[in-house]
Amino acid sequence: MNFTLAAVSVLCAAVLLALFKLLRNMAAAGRSLPVTAEWIDELSVERYRPMMRLLDGADLDFLRSQPGFTPQAAAKLRIQRCQIFRGYLRSLSSDFGRINGAIKLLMLQSRRDRPDLAATLMRQQLLFACGVLTVQFRLVLYRFGFCGVDVTDLVRIFDSMRLELRSLVPSALLASRASLTTVLAFPSPL
């Protein structure tokens, strides 16, 4: 009983530590501003579509049906795809952190308080960080052939925050490719 309690306590502490580290890394990514209007305009879910299909089991199933395909080749393919997937995940997390940083700056420069937006921002950050932890855990399992990895929820959270940022930055500034720092220099109608 004591061993089980200790193991659960250690596991919970590890998960909390990982969650804290992820939130801190996302906050650090948001500090790499100024984000340009061009960058905001180029943000798209399409950038992460390959990530959503990268670990799909259909490719491996097809390759298994081919003559000469070995379990060692499948393991090597899973390793390579995990490495590529982690690159996408780092990029997604970085973009998400920048979006959050930009929204925070816009909120600070706003004439109006937006507690609803602040609450949404905090909730989305927590959901994203928990989603990244879940994806990383499932990625380890995928590496050994136990399960698949679905990032649909992460991409959905990213997209909702991307759309929120686009709604806060006037479209005229996006069209003129002005930098976000220019937007912050003027009082915002938020």
Image (cartoon, helix red, strand yellow):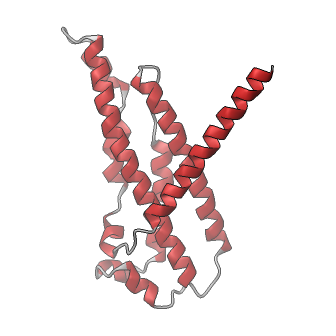
Residue at x 49%, y 31% (from the top left corner): 138
Residue furthest top as drawn: 67
Residue at x 28%, y 31% (from the top left corner): 80
- Visible in this render: residue 180? yes
Residue at x 19%, y 8% (from the top left corner): 67
| Quadrant of image for the C terminus | bottom right
**Closest to the observer, 38 or 34:** 34
**Closest to the observer, 93 or 59:** 93
| Quadrant of image for the N terminus | top right
Residue at x 35%, y 39% (from the top left corner): 85
Residue furthest bottom as drawn: 186
Residue furthest left as drawn: 68
- Visible in this render: residue 164? no
**Closest to the observer, 85 or 42:** 85
Quarter of the rendering containing residue 31: bottom left
Q: Position of residue 118 (x, y in %)?
A: 63, 69
Q: Position of residue 153 (x, y in %)?
A: 51, 45
Q: Is residue 36 above or below residue 97?
A: below
Q: Position of residue 151 (x, y in %)?
A: 45, 41
